[in-house]
Image (spheres, rainbow, N blue to C red):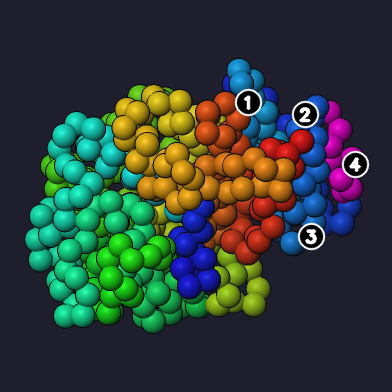
Amino acid sequence: MARQGALRRGFGVVAVVVAVTAGTVTAASAAGGDGRHGATRAAMAELVRDEGLPGTIAGVREGDGGWSAAVGVADTTTGRARSARERFRIGSVTKTFTATVVLQLRAEGRLDLDDTVERWLPGVVPPDGTHSPVITVRQLLGHRSGLFSYDEDPLMIERLASPAFLAHRYDTYRPEDLVRIAVSHPRLFEPGEKVSYSNTNYILAGMIIEKVTGRPYGREIERRIVRPLGLSGTSLPGTAAGMPRPHALGYSTLFGGSTTPLETTELNPSWGGAAGEMISTTADLTRFYSALMRGKLLPRAEMAEMVPATGGPGLGIGTARLSCGVTLWGHDGGIHGSSTVALTTRDGRHVAAFHTNADWVVGERRLMEAEFCR
């Protein structure tokens, strides 16, 4: 679960498919025919082989061109190969979409980042008697609220990160239920004092979007981002457990709760909500992050809030500095049977998204290094 990394991970293409079995594909053979992206495909093959993963896919936008690739299998029983066109659960990458909508509302003068949670959601986050009751919208988006993450509650860990998940995978959680779980625990620190990743922050951000607009946050993401950008493979499933086709099967070790991988493709993602429920594709994610960084979704002032010029944590987005000195912006996300990372240069001209249909992957940084440190 989040304790083990579930939603805590904070950070025109031509499809080419290569099915591999662990130990049978070398970096050299995987690199053939991919031009500037040969090292990326090689790193994908190595990742699948070294970590015993079913498969991984990639999508890249660079300048006016694109590239995509798939390595490994979508179904370990049939051996069906992965496809770069597949849809998948993006987990915490959802947070960048949610933060973008909040910042659009700020640009429209409908809320301020220094507004308090209490102003928009009176009584939802009660004082805890120890820390300041004043939490701002800015602190939510920057993970500086001090609020306990609901998915670290012992009962939630039991339901999400143990074999009990199989009996609870279709459970529905309302946002207010998740917040109620979170505020039953003491605050971790004084608001604004430091950064501590908490999914509770983005559940509250989604609730504020609905309070300000009168529409659910998912509808606002669709209206403001998905439809204008033509993200045809992106959806907000709400409580729907199924996956739109095409998709791979997802395999999970329940974030440490199972010694063997379990097939967990179907699940009710309402426990992730505005912090992690979305479904997308590599092509859609690269289009989204490119548009965001090029100023097509937010005015300059709001972009400066999201992506501070000084670097460091942003609002709904984070940074990764690679060994070659390149700094990237983006987010990663994990949910049962699915691991995603989407990263972009600050100018939005080089964007990459990777997805693995498993949740025990740990070496994704090698993919970033291969793609951006050529």
Q: Which residue is mark 3?
A: 50
Q: Amino acid at mark 3?
A: Asp
Q: Nearer the viewer, residue 218 or 149?
A: 149
Residue 119 position within the rendered picture, expressed as x and y whole percent measured from the top left: 10, 55
Please report whichever mark, 1 or 3, sits nearer to the chain's N-terminal start.
3
Farthest front residue in view: 310
Instruction: Residue 62: give its label.
Output: 1
Whole-angstrom CA distance, mark 3 to mark 2, is: 23 Å
Q: What span is in magenta?
A: 25-33
Residues marked 4 and 3 touching at CB (< 8 Å)? no
**Closer to the camera: disc 3 or disc 2?**
2
**Closer to the camera: disc 2 or disc 4?**
2
Q: Which residue is mark 2?
A: 36
Please report whichever mark, 1 or 4, sits nearer to the chain's N-terminal start.
4
Residue 344 position within the rendered picture, expressed as x and y whole percent measured from the top left: 56, 36
Q: Amino acid at mark 1?
A: Glu
**Closer to the camera: disc 1 or disc 3?**
1
Is label 4 in a helix, a strand or a loop?
Answer: helix
Number of numbered discs on residues: 4
Whole-angstrom CA distance, mark 1 to mark 4, is: 23 Å
Q: Which quadrant is the C terminus positioned in?
A: top right
Mark 2 closeness class: few <14, some 14–19, many ≥20 residues within 10 Å = few
Whole-angstrom CA distance, mark 1 to mark 3, is: 28 Å
Is label 3 in a helix, a strand or a loop?
Answer: helix
Residue 314 position within the rendered picture, expressed as x and y whole percent measured from the top left: 42, 47
Instruction: Residue 28: give its label.
Output: 4
Please report whichever mark, 4 or 3, sits nearer to the chain's N-terminal start.
4
Locate residue 302 relative to residue 2 in the image: left or right.
left
